[in-house]
Amino acid sequence: MNTKIKEKILKGMAASPGIAIGTPFHYVHETLNISRESVVDHEIESEIVKYRASLESVRQQLAEDRKNAMKRGGSDAAKIFDSHLMIVNDQVLTDEVIYFISAHNVKSSYAVSKVMKDYQAAFEKIKNQYFSQRAFDIEDVCRRIVKDLISDEKQKGRSGVIKGRQIVISDNIFPSDTLNFNKDHLLGIITEFGGITSHAAILSRALEVPAIVGVKSVSKWIKNATLIILDGYAGKVILNPKPSTFEKYKKRQHEDEKQLRDDLKYSSLPSVTEDGQNISIMSNIQSSSEADNAIRWNSDGVGLFRTEFLFKSSNTILSEDEQFKVYDEVAEKLYPRHVVIRILDIGGDKLDDKIAVKEDNPFLGQRGMRLLFTHTRILRSHLRAIVRASSRKNVSIIIPFVANLTEIKKTLNLIKKIRKELNDEGHIIDNEIKTGVMIEIPSAALTADSIAKYVDFFSIGTNDLTQYVLAADRGNERVSNIYDSFHPAVIRLIDMSVKAAKKKKIGIGICGQMGGYPMAIPLLLGLGLRELSVTPFLVPSVKKIIRRLNTAECREIAKKCLKSPTSRSVSVILSDYFEKKIGNNPLQ
Amino acid sequence: MITENVQIINSLGLHARPAARLVKITSGYDCDVFITKDDMEVNAKSIMGVMMLAAEQDSVITVKCSGPDENECLKDIKELINNKFYEE
């Protein structure tokens, strides 16, 4: 057998950002194949009593975990434990276990695992993903009950305990695991199965532990690994890293840690430039629990609430009321700060097999409003839910992916109709609800002056704008050298949009990844932008940079960039300035 | 014993929350309640059982009540389902 230690990279899905470097801890779930142990007739009653007592103790554990999850991860995390509580409280299930104990003269631990295994198997067979995923919940609850029962019998301790600080690798992590790991010992999580919408992924994000899910055969590879690096930004696991890789990540991790300390210091300071210009730093979010993060990092509001994720994670088209609940919850959490809700932008990379059809060229096909106008029932209930959430007057709507004025006018008309409809039905709504458009197709930037007459604000989506103006798919690695938001064409389009907005005195912000890229910030301020919307945890670092900038200097930088011939020359101007002004060179 | 076919019309179908509401109603009655869908019969007083049916929107389930208060129980169940579990 070849035992030579070699660097090996495995890919998975990035579920929670961050870098972890450490030794692997292979977390093997205790198998629930509790062997059949018989009891004599007069012991049956005490087995039933033990079973009932364990249900009670699991109920208490769940209530406790729910409370912790709520504190550490908000309502999304807490809900998981509500569903587990429902399983524990299932009277029929309880009766079945009790019947099994007395009918077969067996120990309660065996009866529980037998009965629940059958349920689990039945759920695993269901085709609908929502229902089949419930098998994991049953397994987790069953494990809790059995663990509680056998702890009595001194059989506990079979599940390993993390020694020191380690990265946990497992086939799957259950909600109960994540909360039970000592956070000081848990460096990160890697799972073989599960998606980015799995319970474990949601929890690790809420707890801010780096995580990667769906790494094929990781438990097999890990056997030959002594040291591993978890790159939760890129979804990469590096086994036995070379010294150069190790150094690179060590440095990155060190920067992250320093950043975090700084961030905490900076998050409560006002975001004002050296020369006294107020810049508002908003957050991009995609769920109600991320709204909590937006608040925790002191954002000035939500500049982009992506609604696609809600539909994706529920696997079905949500009803008007279900959507309303989420939008309203977010608006309430953020109040008095503002929330910009983006109309569902599906198609292309965010395809939803429920309503999208296969297209040869989805990025240039029927996405965003183009798709929604062919599904007016979905569009109407979606818009109604958003407008209904405006009762506190802190909600705006943004129209995604528009190429021409007709689409904008059509959407505005529909919103107007819906407002009237809701008024007639007696709903309290904001009748002056503001509507903006995303500047992400080059035609919208080029005709921004015409569009500005019809809407209240613009938001520049630099990711799409870059991919469309450079004709380079942002997800295609083969053209990743072409895709560059510092291309002068992108900068000129941003410049045109800002000028058009200022001329018509409407609002303008930026919500693409460019806004959170340190080097780009002087350029964006120099182009006249005063509102940046970024991932919540980036808010403090953006603020830190802004507080050291001077807008007059930024304007000079922007002028130089606008005249630059290539992305490379723009990068050089920006990195030189950044190094001079902020210190470290962000290109490294 | 009374039996009736009912169509699920809410968009989520018998997801966790609607299933929990259904169980809450059935548990309040003395009669036995069973639901059948595609040859699978489950006890309607069990949330696990009800969810195991994986009843999506537009599917038809057969509700069977048997006991002294069977009529009232079936009426309540139908009302809940036809009102989309009071969620939409």
Image (cartoon, coloured by chain):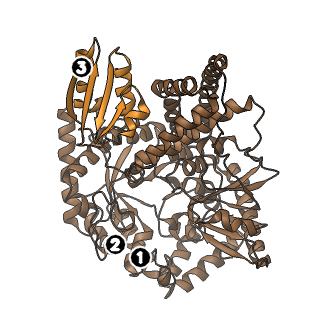
Distance between the alpha carbons at the discs numbered 2 and 1: 10 Å
Tags 3 and 2 touching, CB below 8 Å? no
Total marks in image? 3
Percent position of residue A99, x then y: 52, 24
Please tell me which residue is depicted at 24% across the width and 15% down the height of the picture.
B72
Residue A363 marker: 2
Q: Residue furthest right?
A: A164
Establish if A533 lies above or below A321: below
Please tell me which residue is depicted at 60% across the width and 77% down the height of the picture.
A574
Percent position of residue B55, x then y: 31, 41
**Amino acid beneath label 1:** Gln
Please tell me which residue is depicted at 64% across the width and 75% down the height of the picture.
A577
Q: Nearer the viewer, residue A537 or A368?
A: A368
Percent position of residue A439, x then y: 36, 66
Labels 3, 1: front one: 3
**Amino acid beneath label 2:** Phe
Chain A colour is brown
Please determine if labels 3 and 1 lie on a single subunit: no
Chain B colour is orange
Q: Is residue A446 visible?
A: no
Q: Nearer the viewer, residue A108 or B44?
A: A108
Q: Is residue A377 left or right of residue A261?
A: left
Distance between the alpha carbons at the discs numbered 3 and 1: 65 Å
Residue B60 marker: none
Q: Is residue B65 left or right of residue A4?
A: left
Q: Nearer the viewer, residue A506 or A321?
A: A321
Quarter of the rendering occupied by the C terminus of chain A: bottom right
Subunit of label 2: A
Q: Which residue is mark 1?
A: A467
